[in-house]
Image (cartoon, rainbow, N blue to C red):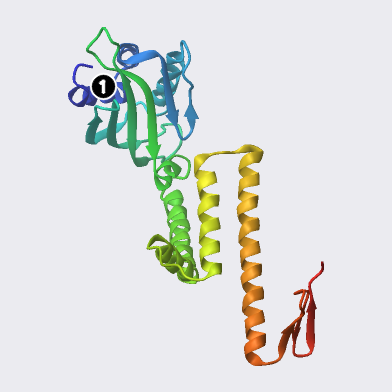
Amino acid sequence: MDDPVKDIGPIVHLLTQGSPKEQETTINTYFTPNASFTHPFCRTFSFNGSRLLIHAIFRWYKIMSPQIHLHIDSIAFDQSNLLLYITITQTFAIWFVPFHRSPVTLTTVLSLTQPPSQKKYYIQSQNDLYQVDQFVRFFLPWNIGRNLVFLWHSFATLCCVVLAVVFAPFTWLEQSWAERRVEGRVGAGFMGAVERVEEWRLKGSGGDSGAEGAGEALGDLAERVRGAGEGVDGERGRLGGFGSMGEEGDKMQFGNMQVVKPN
């Protein structure tokens, strides 16, 4: 392709609506020999000659639905990363399945490559992205799949609302931690441990070292909470006039209950 934004429209129509020969020529012209293809139901990997698998996938696509109604809604080119985004609306109807008709919307992401000695762009990989309520229409037509996904999405949204309310104190603690105004050993210890665990996870340390690090952070959190609890309980006892602690700090008395800390 000389200009991906201008050239990709005719290429898409040839791949999906052209004759078998036009489809074959288009793949050979614009896809690299080691191009890859990714779809919710199938994928190839990139290796020398992997383009042959793309030929087979598009042939079967045309066999299932020889006539496809397709419209390109938008095209965007990220030139710095050589990524071409195409939003497509198509109607896919498998001719040997009675009454089958699947109108779907997808976004195709093409990763392009430009050989140093050439000015043309070639397709290195194709990734077809469907929302869940779209790709289920291929195997659950007549709005069955769409309605099931709608119910699931509604239930998941309700769960998000309920859990957001239940864990509102954690949101408040997060905001306080971000503003560096967390007070108290328990709050500071908890958020510090959470932050360290997340850092280990996000860095992808993995292995035993990552597990040990997370374990240490959680152990530190437990120790901080335990220590803070002992301090609060002891203070309560002293202020209430009924608590006492031995000189060695191994016994605590609360009313009729005595807590003994093992040595």
As drawn, 184 above or below 62: below
**In this rendering, position of residue 149 left or right of residue 69:** right
**In this rendering, position of residue 255 left or right of residue 201:** right
Number of other residues with Cα within 10 Å of mark 1, as a class: few under 14, some 14 to 19, many 20 or more: many
As drawn, 102 above or below 34: below
As drawn, 89 above or below 262: above
Name the outermost residue toward the front: 247
As drawn, 245 above or below 195: below
Q: Quadrant of residue 190?
A: bottom right
**Callout 1 amino acid:** Ile
Of 247 and 13, nearer the camera is 247
Residue at 33% in and 17% down: 23
Residue 212 position in % (x across, y down): 65, 45
Residue at 66% in and 87% down: 238
Secondary element type, mark 1: helix
Residue 187 position in % (x across, y down): 52, 67
Residue at 45% in and 49% down: 145
Of 119 and 258, nearer the camera is 258
Which residue is the site of mark 1? 11
Of 119 and 62, nearer the camera is 119
Residue at 63% in and 85% down: 236
Residue 25 position in % (x across, y down): 31, 11
Q: How many marks?
A: 1
Q: Quadrant of residue 246?
A: bottom right
